[in-house]
Amino acid sequence: MKQITILTFTICIFVNSNFAQKKMPVTSKIIYAFSHIKDTNRPDIITKEDMMLYITPGESKYQSYTLYIMDSIKNENFKRTGKLFVSNGTREQIFTDFDNRLQFSIIPWIEDTLLIKNNLDSINWIIKDSTKNIEGFQCLKAEGVCKGRTYVAWFCPEIAIPAGPWKLSGLPGLILEAYDLRKSIMFDFKSITNTNLPEFIQLPNKTSLVTISEYNKMKESLLSNPAGYINSVINSNGLSIGINSTSKIDIKSSSSGNMARKKINNPLEL
Amino acid sequence: MFYKSDFKFYLLLIFFLFFSFTLLCQNIYSGSIKDSLGNPISSAIIKIQNINSININSYVYSNKNGQFNIKDFDKKNSTLIISKLGYYSVSVKCDSINDSIPLIILQKKYFTLPEVKIKNNPIYIKSDTINYFVKSFEQKQDLVLGNVLKRLPGVEVTSSGQIKYQGVAINKLYIEGQDLLDNKYALATNNIPITAIDQIQILENHQPIKAIDSFSFSNQAAINIKIDKSFKKKVFGRGMISSTSFSPLSIIEIIPMNFSDYQFIGSIKFNNIGNDISVEQNSFNNETIVDDLRGFTKNIDLLNISSTQVPNIEKSRYLNNNTKIFTYNSISSSNKNYQLKYNIDYLSDNQKQISSITNKYKYGEDVFTHIDNSYLKSKQENFKTGISFVSNLKNRYIKNDLIIEKSDKISDGKFVVSGDSINQKLQNNFKNIINKFSLIKVFGTANFAFRSYSSYNNTNQDLDISNINIELPIDTVYFNRYLKQSIFLSSYYLHNYFSVSKKFKYLILESKFGNWNIFQSFNSGLYNTKIYYKTNLLDSTSMRSNNSQSNIYQSFNVSYISKAVKISLTFPLNYYYENVSIYNSNGTLKKYSRYEYSFLSRFNISNKLILFTEKSSNYLPAAPYLTSNGYSLNNYRSLINNYGFSSNYIFDNTKVNLSYKDVKKILFISFTYLNEKNTANTSVDRFFKNEFMINKLILKENISVNNKYIFTLNKYLSNLNTSFIGGISLENYFGTQYKNKMPFNFTNNLLLINAKLISKISKFSIEYSVNYSNQRVINSPINSIMFKNEFSLYTDIFKNSYLKMNIDNYNYKNWNSSNNNYSFVDLSVFSQSINKKRNFEIGVKNLFDISSFTSYNINSNILSISEYNLRERYIYTSLNFIF
């Protein structure tokens, strides 16, 4: 167990140091309106969220903008009132290193942060003749398959970075708008702002490196028996949750039913 | 065995040869990219692009060592472009590439992407505040706040500049939460640069006095302008200079402003191009309007020179002016609790007009026609200054305003009546001083209020008429030629009240006690100016009186204020005392009492639907000097005599306002019903003799009723950048007019339909509005129908250069069987810098050179045909700049 921990840390340090080469500050922030019909039987229920993409000349970081705003309000509120509220949104963050063609998914996990490392997907984009003006940016159309779906992407050659929302990337320009052919998943361009702060795209310091199959197993265990899984994780780590250490955690078994009921027949990744 | 292995060998050889041949045929080109220091550049985009389009044929990325391979491409029609964020792109013509691509060196650059601000819903609501993101409604031609304000859904800016929200006038316009301008907000709307504004907030149901916020409720909204961060801590402003084909200098404007802790906005303006800049000194929402009326604090022409009704077209088309204004407003806070406000306004306004008016007074089958052709020049000079001390806190409110005003007017006119030329000169000198004091103190759930209003003013007015040839039938004497009507009126007014309020959870009780007094001194005389010394023509034209009027009132108010329901009922009892002394004799003392009441209610039927009702009855006695007995020549056409009658008016108003708003869908609908009934105890009886008219007051009750139904709808489609505004108003008015003591009843109907579409389609910004009005005298063929189309188009012609075109079309059909059609066209080209700091415009106004405009109006039993000379076609250039 000790050896595994050391190995994990070593890998993490290596990954971080690798990622941290030739750092350049974040130049721009792009906001996308993300909408997703999770259950195609209920097309009237659309999950909407604002997502944000930070870009530097060689990297990008994609995360929920809605959650970012909510978290800052939550922190402010907690400082003022001592009350916490739960905010919903996509917690996964995606880091892309174009120079090394790597992609990392950062997933907060019960008192931990998981790091999934992948090679950057090579999407076989076919560039079409169509053009479109999106808020003053002249864009070209491309079609390609990503994570089991065919996407239409409108990219802007003027912004010379192969980045885009979520895991859509690899075009000769920033993707400003994308949607699948059924338009059940859409990324609409909302804004672009230049950042003047010397911010850098960096992986979190403390993460646990897992493979995608390990992560899927963990997710399955959590969904099948949330109370048992969380308790087992807490007990094995000797952790205590809560603001007040004496407060007890009472995760009722009924909650497992709630989580299990949230079925998605149209997930983001097929 | 040998043969078998031989065969395998040859097969393999043939395969490799074929593969190599294929590879050779594909012509793979290699290259490498480095920065100026020789470091390899990875993940750069290398693309082959058509020369004549932005289409990309193929693309690859450079690897970690900055190297790349790209397959065969069409050398003739392609360009190789190498680009990476943060570096200058490099283009290589493909036909210059032979066997290999030369080393490509990319130079670093400091770069910023063109920003696109967040496109959230352009408006959102939080509690009672609706926030509008200005950038969502701004268009490229917009320069100042007013340009975008009129485009905000739910907001209406009237032709006079007044701002309404959901059909109700706003009660304050704040800048960064400060009440700098005291409702003279046209100065802000016409001058704050659009680039300096971040957000516009509508504060619904706004009570400006914090101390009574929980004791009362308001149906009026306020507007708060939030200034962009980059403009907050500095002095900035806008300026303009313009010249025209008729004057080398037509507009000069400098408006500096600062909206930090110490706020100020000042302006120096000159123009002779027809812009009515005097509106920037007008107050749009007067909190003490009744006191101002009673105290005679507005400079009103008691005598007048007949003037022609102004046409219902853009003012700059007919206004022939030479106007200078100077304005300075400041507000400073020594600390958060106290503020000191200072204001100074100066206006010098010279105007000219050439016009004619035909008035037809209709009494049954009798019609009396008066025709005036006039050439009028007027000169006005106003000076006003005010200083205010304000402390607006939740537990205490103190405010003292001191206002000093001086105004001088001279109007000089030449009139042609029945072929004769008559000269008239009107002089009006006015001086006024007002002090207003308010104190409100909150003690837990109770409050105590004291208010005092005092004013002193005097006006000296002379009307000189020369060459008059009309017989003036006063008593049995007729005179003519050279006359002077002089009036001197001084008024002292004092109004004090105090009130006590107590709050019991939802219930609020208020008791108010107050009194007001007016003392007026009045002199009036009609003189023959041809003779050496000044004497009154007759005893009946000489009036000298000292008058007083007093009122003691007490009122009770019961209010119920919960979140959903707000009701207020006021039922005061007033005691009036009037004392009129004519000459030096003892006057008559009249005592009487009158009930007044008001009822207000507001029901929040849902978050979106609100019903507001108001019913009130108010009593207003005419000014005491009007109870004098004698003739005065009001203008060269009419004599007035009130015969000592004391007029009074009862105003009964009913108002129902139903408003619906859905901020998410950006839909605003309002319906208003108004019933205004005015009951006067006296009527005006008219006598006509040829071109002359005598108006005598008679003791006959006169009731006039005005019904209005107003419906407005405002919908904004953010996806289409399109806004639709529609409105219907139906007015119904009936009353009685007397001629030779005979009553004639009449009813007027007025139907107004307005629709406006504002849209931005690709490079085109379009504003199109249609106005239809139909005035009609019931039970008669008399009507006037006006159909007005206004179309504005803005479009890009070059980079940062735009074309602006306005087309206004008016079509009149009326009882006179004439059908007038006018089309005004204005054309201009303007060019502006990207940050809108400079804007240069060149254009032509009134392209078709329309020289006069005739309009038709119906006002009770008076039918008017007015012809107004317009400003002829001219070319102009202007430069707008922000500093």
Image (spheres, coloured by chain):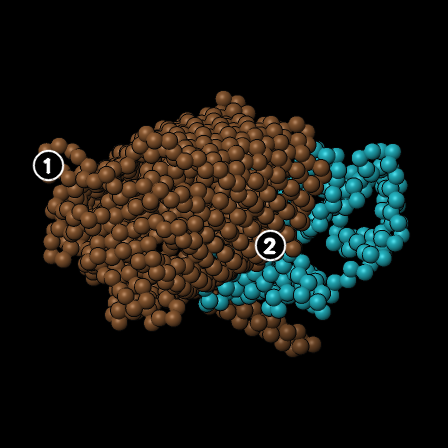
Disc 1 on helix, strand or loop?
loop
Name the one closer to the observer, B412 or B75: B412
| Shade of chain B as shown in the rendered figure | brown
Name the one closer to the observer, B71 or A264: A264
Marks 2, 1 in one chain: yes
Residue A202 located left or right of residue A261: left
Residue B96 vertical position relative to residue B108 in the rendered view, above or below: below
Residue B574 located left or right of residue B636: right
Q: Please give the letter of the chain rendered in cyan.
A: A
User: Residue B531, position in %: x, y?
Assistant: 10, 36
Label 2 crowd bin: few (<14), some (14–19), many (20+), radius 10 Å:
some
User: Residue A20, position in %: x, y?
Assistant: 61, 39
Comes first in the chain, label 2 or label 1: 1
Task: Inspect this view and state whether residue B787 appears.
Answer: no
Type of the residue with mark 2? Leu
Count of numbered labels shown in the rendering: 2
User: From the image, which quarter does the N terminus of chain B lie in?
Assistant: bottom right
**Cα gap from disc 2 to disc 1, whole angstroms:** 66 Å
Type of the residue with mark 1? Ile
Give the letter of the chain under mark 1: B
Q: Of discs 2 and 1, which sits in the foreground?
A: 1
Which residue is tagged 1? B531
Which residue is tagged 2? B611
Q: Which mark is residue B92?
A: none
User: From the image, which quarter does the C terminus of chain B lie in?
Assistant: top left
